[in-house]
Amino acid sequence: MIYLRGALGTLCFVIISTIAFGQKSLTKEADLIYQAGSYFAAVDAYKKAYSKEKSQSEKARILFRIGDSYRLIQEPDQAEVWYLKAEAAEYPDPLIFVHLGDILRVQGEYEESIERYRTAAGKASGEIKATAEKGISACEKAVKWQKSPARYVVNNEVQLNSKFYDFSLIYADKKLESVLFTSSRPAASGNSIDEIYGESFSDIYFSERDNKGKWSTPVPLAENINSEANEGAAHLDSKFSQLYFTRCGYDKNKPFGCQIYTARSQGQAYADPELLDFGIDDTTAAGHPVAIDDELILFASDMYGGQGGKDLWTIRYDKKAKLWGPAVNLGPDINTAGNEMFPYVHANGDLYFASSGHVGMGGLDIFKSKMKGQEVEDLKWGAPENLGAPINSSANDYAIIWEEDKDRGFFTSDRRGGKGGDDIYSFMMPPLIFKLEGTVTDVDTKEPLGDVKVSIVGTDGSVGEVKTDPTGHYEFETRDNEERYILESTSYTVEVTAIEQAASNGHKYLGAKGQETTVGLKESTAFVKDFALLCADCNKEIKMPLVLYELGKWDLMVDESKNINSKDSLEYLFSILSENPTIIVELAAHTDTRGSDKSNQILSQKRAETCVKYLIDRGIEPERMVPVGYGETRPIISDAQIAALPSEEERNAAHQKNRRTVFQVLSFDFIPKDTDGDTGSK
């Protein structure tokens, strides 16, 4: 029998033939069972042989073969036990370290796996050494993928799964409310037991979910589809009217390969299936069909001419000749010396498949190749990309499908935590949840400001507006229609306005702006952006960052060696004027009391005018600024107070505070220039 299930052991193609045992020893008999592919039976046969075997070298080889058999029937914990026994018995083939590394990797024991791969690389050369080095690289990448998983939420579909093998789910109707999948649960057709795994042969099952999302008890398809052989790895065409599936023949007298069948739907049932004759001999495996259209099929096979193991192939139907073929290999970019199986073509044309040959986390991993041609029929796909965690794991992961236009679907895995055997898992990408909140206060009094307008504008064109509550708090979370304000991959300008309408304390405040972005974020985030506003009508001068001048001069001081640039200080006022386009300000300059009144008055006026000129050059309308020099008439520290200070340093600092440049809001009704260039007016 040729059996198709899919993970290197659990779901691979295997050939079993009935062999007449007339061997001279139990060891030879066990070897023949192993070579026939009956790994489940081989375990018991080798254990019996071990107790009778006298040769120590043969005992070591038997231990290795028991470990191999457990590996091939997907029992990694038992495989590890017996490989370790073979290692302790000094089994000489360095391949044992590769297999032990594989088994440890499948169980997620990456550090221990690397140790065994390094041992193999040190003892071997050629292909074994290359395989070991590839294993080391795979472990290192797996650790990185585990540390930085995608945001997918993965759940075991417990209502569909059993303690047996359940795998390869597909949608069975256009509404995506019913499914077909493969299972080896005891309700399968026929009474035979699979000699590879010691379970029933697999059949195709049907289930549908109700409006609450609950799956019905799975039931097998009719016996015209499910036979005494293994059926599975099915596919339905885009109309959900033509079923394609794999059947692995079974005959006790000779080996059979897996073949692809098709059947037309007839209501809730299917017509008798027909073999798609690809011209492949009956000992070769062909399965996992995907019908790109009625005349083009993508499938997996171990036929001659591939890259090694099981490869992905395409085959076309020639209407004139009424024949399929020849099959075309997808080539070395997709196929490897390992196994490539379970293809799936997304609605967008991308190819998904499972592989043990490309660098993965362990066992079979799921890979994606982007479509390169204009149409799927061009059959051109790019280099495969590992989907990483949590879709892939250290175990076998395969048979992924997607819900069209949705970031969710199903796949199969034998990872830890399942119900048994291989299980069906659902996955979905949860939406990123973002919100923006903060508090608006008076910069001087720290008083919370209620009734202040806060608005956002997104780079996607979205807008939003809220007002602060009595505690000064604002929040952008969900709109009235329950859509969210803050979305993925979008940048936002946040603007606070309290000039058009006074805040809750009766004062008007200068507005402020900020920026937030969700671009590149991979986790839900609550942004907190607080604003402290300047009172615009409190009849007091508003301080600015220190604007420095040379002694007795009005040029803006710039001294890079001392990290002084008064132009940077004026950028503070430039930002305020830009963010509050309707205000008119008085820009005032003051001197200390040293020097004559007249010279200080002239000096302060020129300094104020210098500041205004800089802002005009930066694009601020001149009508919005009134330069005023107050000389030494408005000191904030008196001469008497300065004279009373104990040190020269403190006295100089006090004089510096008097030599200040400040501004004050005169009015709020400036009308900016319109698009026709009309001059703004007061």
Image: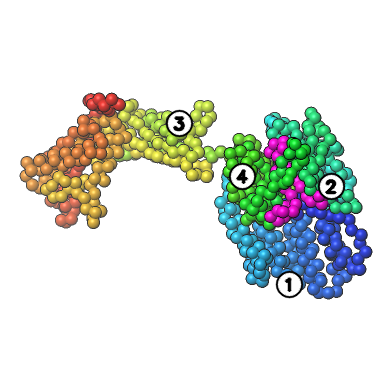
Q: Residue at x 23, y 55 (%)?
A: 562
Q: Residue at x 82, y 38 (%)?
A: 274
Front disc: 4 or 3: 4
Using the image, tell me which numbered label, if any, was put on residue 249. 2
Q: Is residue 165 visible?
A: no
Using the image, tell me which numbered label, if any, was put on residue 380. 4
Per the image, the residue denoted by label 3 is 462
| Dot 2 or dot 1, earlier in sequence | 1
Please rate how many residues cluster around mark 3, counting C-alpha atoms within 10 Å: few if below 14, some from 14 to 19, many from 20.
Answer: few
Using the numbered discs, state the Cα–Cα distance from disc 3 to disc 1 in whole angstroms. Answer: 69 Å
| Dot 3 or dot 2, earlier in sequence | 2
Please rate how many residues cluster around mark 4, counting C-alpha atoms within 10 Å: few if below 14, some from 14 to 19, many from 20.
Answer: some
Q: Position of residue 6 (x, y in %)?
A: 74, 49
Using the numbered discs, state the Cα–Cα distance from disc 4 to disc 3 in whole angstroms. Answer: 38 Å
| Dot 1 or dot 4, earlier in sequence | 1
Left or right side of 199 for 677: left
Three-letter code, disc 3: Ser
Three-letter code, disc 4: Lys
| Dot 4 or dot 3, earlier in sequence | 4
Using the image, tell me which numbered label, if any, was put on residue 92. 1
| Image-quadrant location for residue 579 | top left
Secondary element at tag 4: loop
Q: Nearer the viewer, residue 674 or 491?
A: 674
- Is the residue 668 above or below the residue 492 in the image? above
Cβ atoms under marks 2 and 4 closer than 8 Å = no
Q: Over which residues does the magenta segment extend? A: 281-310
Using the numbered discs, state the Cα–Cα distance from disc 3 to disc 2 in whole angstroms. Answer: 60 Å
Quadrant containing the C terminus in the rendered view: top left
